[in-house]
Image (spheres, coloured by chain):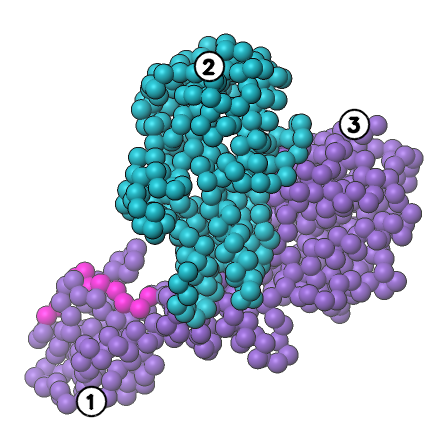
Chain colours: A cyan, B purple
Amino acid sequence: MYRDALREAIDEEMERDSSVFIIGEGIAERGGSYKVTEGLLDKYGANRVRDTPIAEAGMIGVGVGAAIAGARPIVEILYVDFAMLGMDMLVNQAAKFRLMTGGDGRVPFVMRTQGGTGGGVAAQHSQSLEALFYHIPGLQVVMPSVPADAKGLLKYALRQQDPVMFLEHKHLYMTKGMVPDGEHVIEFGKGDIKRPGKDVTIIAWSNMIPRALEAAAKLAEEGIDAEVLDPRTLVPLDKAMILTSVAKTNRVVIAQEAVRRGGVASDIASIIQAEAFYDLDAPIEIVAGLNIPVPFNLELEKASVPQVDDIVVAARRTLHAKSFALAAE
Amino acid sequence: MARPILMPQVGQDLTEGKITALNIKVGDKVKKGDIVAEVESEKAVFEVEAFETGTVLEVRYKVGDMAIVLEPIIMVGEEGEVLESAATTGFSGENAQEIVSQAGESVTATPVELARETETAWLKTGTGGSSPLARRLAGSAGVDIAQITGTGPRGAVVKRDVEAFQRSRSGTASVLPFSGSSVRASGGALPVRTLQSGTGDPVVLIHGFGGELSAWKPFVAHLGLANPILALDLPGHGAAASSVATDFESLTAAVHASLVAEGIDRVHLVGHSLGAAVAASIAGGGNLQVRSLSLLSPGGLGPRINGDYIAGFLSSTSEAALKVWLELLVHDPALLPGVLVRATLAAREGTAMVDHQARLAAGVFAGNTQLFSIRDALLRFGGPVRAIVGREDRIFPSEQSDAVPSHVGLYRLPNVGHLPQLEAASLVGRLVAEAVRSAG
């Protein structure tokens, strides 16, 4: 499972590199709210696996400081929503330090956190905030969608010299998938074709990948062969893979759970229109969350973020297929 | 005898422009050559010249109005003449010339009708009523997109319409990559020639799109290697002009098969451009023991290619035209061997070379896009590999070479274009030789 893959990565890297440590709320005694860090306290002791008070600004500050001093901290923030308390440390300190020290100072800091909707936890616990970090030069943004990627990317993150925003998804922790044992490291900036296809490219990440794959399966029944492209890291972005795919399919749907306005999808769309304009046979479709705080009510929550059928409909539009009403579920 | 002064058509896509200045008013005298108005298109302001001498009878727009292309801005006639107002026929771009030549009737139409007609014209001519890809495909196939019936949103012409149109035209080549027949080299193998005999694992040189093996001859001396040095002609090129490869896979397969037919199982590969991509693909395929790989201006590192070059190279039939395109290959045009232009044209004479190269191009390039990538192949290749590119390359953007995996030695040469083996022969010879020797 996704959460076991994350634990494997942390465990292997803590074993390999004694400067790796992890702090967070309830991660030691309780093994973490999503059980990612279960068992690590027993193995590595309280110096390297440490519970913190509910004080995210302090936790992120400690992490960034420790990274500057040469350690390799992982700071687990329970919800990405709470990372906002540490934005000064992330945006003004961690992201800038290398440049402002002429390259001498490095910040090998990893913030692990999770976002997205998942079962009615309401507006302050359901956001997808990757665009905030994506916007800040100096931060790398990683959003794994499957267990194998979660492990490989986290191991790579723990070998970087610059800050990494490692954004997991609360819906994905219990998802299953094969994970290579041992040394499985995935370089940043290398996307992955989760399903090859020739008619339309669906670009998605994190929890939108399972939905895009489900959408692709439905489209296949209609004879539409969709390619599902997972950039895996938003910064750096695998532009070459995206442009190559667009050159093949000529049509693009970008699906993000985050709200539409000012999102990463808009930026990817702008890159495609600038660099692959004459490969496009239809306007780029963006499927995204509504520009609202995520509602508490489960049905409204569902309506506020993209579902499988939203992706299906958008893909059909790019193929200029006749739109027809979808049967209500 | 009122005659119109028309809103000029400047640029294919312009349908209307904004009147930014009117230098005349009703009753003024104008003579041929006078600048009567200024009109602004998207980015440029241009002047409207009077092609008629006479008195201004009517000014159809005021400053700030949008004027429709090939519609009258001003009506000019004899002093005192009264403009007939009863004309009922509409005025559109199609009959403008006719009306101008008749120049006898006054012409009016209601703005509403004009707007409607213009919108239809806009969709028909494909400016906005077609997808960017459809325009590109139609353009590269030499088809006027206005002839194509659109089935996209609001009748827009999309890719499938261009394809359908192409299919409906009998006897014309499709703009789509050919599939099906791959290689039809007589006997299956490509011509391989030994440029230098020697000892050790052979070095095989693979030329790029539009080249041929003999072009390597001046470069061989710069290598200073004792190994045997061989070169081959790609399908549709040089002595293999009669054979065809129609996609990247069959191109690679043809080269691979020819090396095997020569009894080569251990080899150092040196390729240029498309030939470099073939070399990388063979090296990554793992079926031959590739000892080292040297890629000069390799294709397949990113999606972009200068599609105009390919189209221009293939379509040029005169020395003057071909010279202009070939000069794009080098940073300093003086370095382009004068004989190359004539030799290229002579080689095409009496062979299917251009046709076969065009079919290959259609299978491996689509406009400004390379349809193949060597990234995965490079990732799979474990031996020493060097990529040498010119910073001033006008065929592939030089930044595209950033995409090489970290284990590839990347050399970016200043003041060099697409032909480093010609433009910086001794340095490139040294770099390639080092790669060969480093394999032991």
In-front residue for pair B262/B390: B262
Image quarter hosting the N terminus of chain B: bottom left
* Range shown magenta: B14-25
The residue that disc 2 covers is A50
The residue that disc 1 covers is B88
Quadrant assignment, res B433? top right
Please tell me which residue is depicted at 28% across the width and 78% down the height of the picture.
B117
Quadrant assignment, res A119? top left
Q: In the shown orientation, is residue B204 left or right of residue A260?
A: right
Label 2 – label 1 distance at C-alpha: 88 Å
Q: Are marks 2 and 1 in contact (CB under 8 Å)?
A: no
Please tell me which residue is depicted at 22% across the width and 80% down the height of the picture.
B113
- Chain of the residue that carries numbered disc 2 in the rendered image: A
The residue that disc 3 covers is B438
Is there any visible trace of residue A187 in the rendered image?
Answer: no
Image quarter hosting the C terminus of chain B: top right
Q: Are callouts 1 and 3 both on one chain?
A: yes
In-front residue for pair A144/B420: A144
Q: In the shown orientation, is residue B347 left or right of residue B88?
A: right
SS for callout 1: loop
* Disc 1 residue type (three-letter): Thr
| Label tally | 3
The disc, 1 or 3, on the residue closer to the chain's N-terminal end is: 1
Is there any visible trace of residue A325 in the rendered image?
Answer: yes
- Chain of the residue that carries numbered disc 1 in the rendered image: B
For residue B21: magenta?
A: yes
Please tell me which residue is depicted at 75% across the width and 52% down the height of the picture.
B252
Label 2 or label 3, whichever lies nearer to me, is: 2
* Disc 3 residue type (three-letter): Ser
Label 1 – label 3 distance at C-alpha: 84 Å
